[in-house]
Image (cartoon, grey):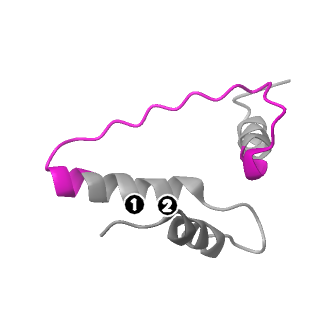
């Protein structure tokens, strides 16, 4: 089943706990698993994100930076 961007957005919003940030990992892994099952092939996810990005992208860059800082994987 192919989802629309609106459906993905609703799933991301539903993945929030206590009005926190969306669970991007869980949602993206679901779609990557479905793609792998559909194609019967492995799927590799490669992500590049600049920690100096000032554009908000719906809070994603800020959220990612905060997650990495809290895990002590990034320092400003």
Query: How many numbered marks have been drawn onto this rendered protein structure?
Result: 2
Q: Is residue 44 magenta?
A: yes
Q: Which quadrant, please, contains the C terminus?
A: top right
Residue placed under numbered mark 1 in the picture: 30
Residue 44 or residue 66, whichever sits in front: 44
Element class at badge 1:
helix
Q: Is residue 34 left or right of residue 72?
A: left
Give the numbered dot on residue 64: none
- Main SS, magenta region, reads loop
Q: Is residue 54 left or right of residue 37?
A: right
Q: Write the residue at 47% across / 54% down.
A: 28
Residue 73, position in %: x, y?
69, 29
Q: Write the residue at 76% across / 75% down.
A: 18
Q: Write the residue at 60% across / 60% down.
A: 23
Q: Residues within 10 Å of mark 1 (few under 14, many from 20)?
A: few
Residue 20, placed above or below residue 58: below
Residue 10, position in %: x, y?
59, 73
CA–CA distance between discs 2 and 1? 5 Å
Residue placed under numbered mark 2 in the picture: 27
Residue 2, placed above or below residue 32: below
Residue 4, placed above or below residue 55: below
Residue 66, placed above or below residue 51: below
Q: Residues within 10 Å of mark 2 (few under 14, many from 20)?
A: some
Numbered range of the magenta stretch: 36-60
Image marks 2 and 1: residues in contact by CB distance under 8 Å: yes
Q: Is residue 22 magenta?
A: no
Element class at badge 2:
helix
Residue 52, position in %: x, y?
80, 24
Residue 56, position in %: x, y?
80, 43
Q: Which quadrant, please, contains the N terminus?
A: bottom left
């Amino acid at each position: 089943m192919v989802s629309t961007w609106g459906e993905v957005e609703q799933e991301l919003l539903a993945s929030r706990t206590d009005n926190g940030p969306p669970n991007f990992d869980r949602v993206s892994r679901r779609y990557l698993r479905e793609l792998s099952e559909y194609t019967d092939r492995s799927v590799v996810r490669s992500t590049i994100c600049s920690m100096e990005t000032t554009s908000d992208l719906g809070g994603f860059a800020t959220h990612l930076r905060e997650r990495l800082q809290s895990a002590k994987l990034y320092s400003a």
